[in-house]
Image: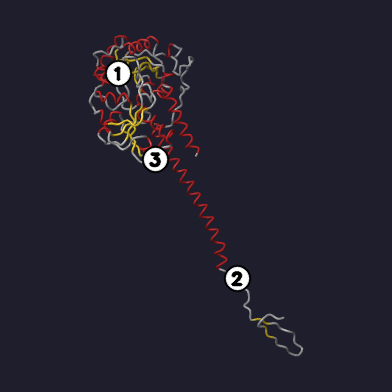
């Protein structure tokens, strides 16, 4: 059979010619076939770009988070061991005094400072009697000096311009490891107890009742490197509650425990991490009303600010300074006037290796958290 609609034309001596009305096949350009190829290819490209964009965004977020945390921790977290410039033969985690007598320092005058701060209004009144006792026991003139920031204070200690000084709880490991600071005595109560805690406080009528309630709120820290005012709370939020700054809550610095506490009492701040001893002292002094703040968290105990000296002072000078601090009678002094109402009435000898273990552990946890972000 012939295909449908075929016509035959026969001529004598001619061949048979087959003709068809069917449309000829076109193997040239086809828009449909182009679409069939282009659409899947576009989807593949779009998907690849989407994955690439997400990866870029994730990397950017991780970098931003690392930058934020590094700033909150006060820079890259230093190790918990001494700088190579120092020796520790007795394994007390403190720099040994130089063995060569030529490397020991016996300054004609001693420079003494308290913790670096922008608030120095009452320092002379507070420390005058202790300065006099140091002069009597060392036989040297003692100058009361002050520093606005810890970095400047540490440089002065390391260079030999500062001889007797104090550091806050969180700044002490850095001063020990990098500047040869030797902690001697902490503020203590009548029983010699020198423990404080980190408290997270909120205004008394705040709806915030527990740590998860801090999500999408603003957390106020004191300053970088402050253990009770920043680091302990930061690690707690991240490590125990998976709450990261910027992602889960806003944050800022007050640059003073007193500023944070007053800010909470006045409802200027939503939440703040502060040292328990400073909170107690401000309540006892009438600086704030006890019922103006609410505590939503209290940490394990830490040592408070500590006084000490430079590692390379002569043994005689070290002994005189240590005995003056530990045996100093606060009764009737500026120290009693300023701190006595909160129950702090004396100095107590400390053991850095044991007493600062919890603080070093927090720093290690912070370093581990930064390492995890770096690996993402």
Instruction: Give the vertical position of 259 relative to 102 (above or below).
Output: below
Mark before the other along the chain sequence, 2 or 3 = 2
| Residue 187 falls in image quadrant | top left
What is the residue that sits farthest to the bottom in this orientation?
12
Q: Which mark is residue 28?
A: 2
Mark before the other along the chain sequence, 1 or 2 = 2
Q: Is residue 88 left or right of residue 6?
A: left
Q: Nearer the viewer, residue 54 or 341?
A: 341
How far apart marks 1 and 2 lie (CA) works out to: 96 Å
Which quadrant of the rendered structure holds the N terminus? bottom right
What is the residue that sits farthest to the right in this orientation?
13
How far apart marks 1 and 3 lie (CA) works out to: 37 Å
Mark before the other along the chain sequence, 1 or 3 = 3
Residue at the (73%, 84%) spot, across then down: 16
Q: Residues within 10 Å of mark 3 (few under 14, many from 20)?
A: some
Which residue does the numbered mark 3 point to in the structure image?
Answer: 248
């Amino acid at each position: 059979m012939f295909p449908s609609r075929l016509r035959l034309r026969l001529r004598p001596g001619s061949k048979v010619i087959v003709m068809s009305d069917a449309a000829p096949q076109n193997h040239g350009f086809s828009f449909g076939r182009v679409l069939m190829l282009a659409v899947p290819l576009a989807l593949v490209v779009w998907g690849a770009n989407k994955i690439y964009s997400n990866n870029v965004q994730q990397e950017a977020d991780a970098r931003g988070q690392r930058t934020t945390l590094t700033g909150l921790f006060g820079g890259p977290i230093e190790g918990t061991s001494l700088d190579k410039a120092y020796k520790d033969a007795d394994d007390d985690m403190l720099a040994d005094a130089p063995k060569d007598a030529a490397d020991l320092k016996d300054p004609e005058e001693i420079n003494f400072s308290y913790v670096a701060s922008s608030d120095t209004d009452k320092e002379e009144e507070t420390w005058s009697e202790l300065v006099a006792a140091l002069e009597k026991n060392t036989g040297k003139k003692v100058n009361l000096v002050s520093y606005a920031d810890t970095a400047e204070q540490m440089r002065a200690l390391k260079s030999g311009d500062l001889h007797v000084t104090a550091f806050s709880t969180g700044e002490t490991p850095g001063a020990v490891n990098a500047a040869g600071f030797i902690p001697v005595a902490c503020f203590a109560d009548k029983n010699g107890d020198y423990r404080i805690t980190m408290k997270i406080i909120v205004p008394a009528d705040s709806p915030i009742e527990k740590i998860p309630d801090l999500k999408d709120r603003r957390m106020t820290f004191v300053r970088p490197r402050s253990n009770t005012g920043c680091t302990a709370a930061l690690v707690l939020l991240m490590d125990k509650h998976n709450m990261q700054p910027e992602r889960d809550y806003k944050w800022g610095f007050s640059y003073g425990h007193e500023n944070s506490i007053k800010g909470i009492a006045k409802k200027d701040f939503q939440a703040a991490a502060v040292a328990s001893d400073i909170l107690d002292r401000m309540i006892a002094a009438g600086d704030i009303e006890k019922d103006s703040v609410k505590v939503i968290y209290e940490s394990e105990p830490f040592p408070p600010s500590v006084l000490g000296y430079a590692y390379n002072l002569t043994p005689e000078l070290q002994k005189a300074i240590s005995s003056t601090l530990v045996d100093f009678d606060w009764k009737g002094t500026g120290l009693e006037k300023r701190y006595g109402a909160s129950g702090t009435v004396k100095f107590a000898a400390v053991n850095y290796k044991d007493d600062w273990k919890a603080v070093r552990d927090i720093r290690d946890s912070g370093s581990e958290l930064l390492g995890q972000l770096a690996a993402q």
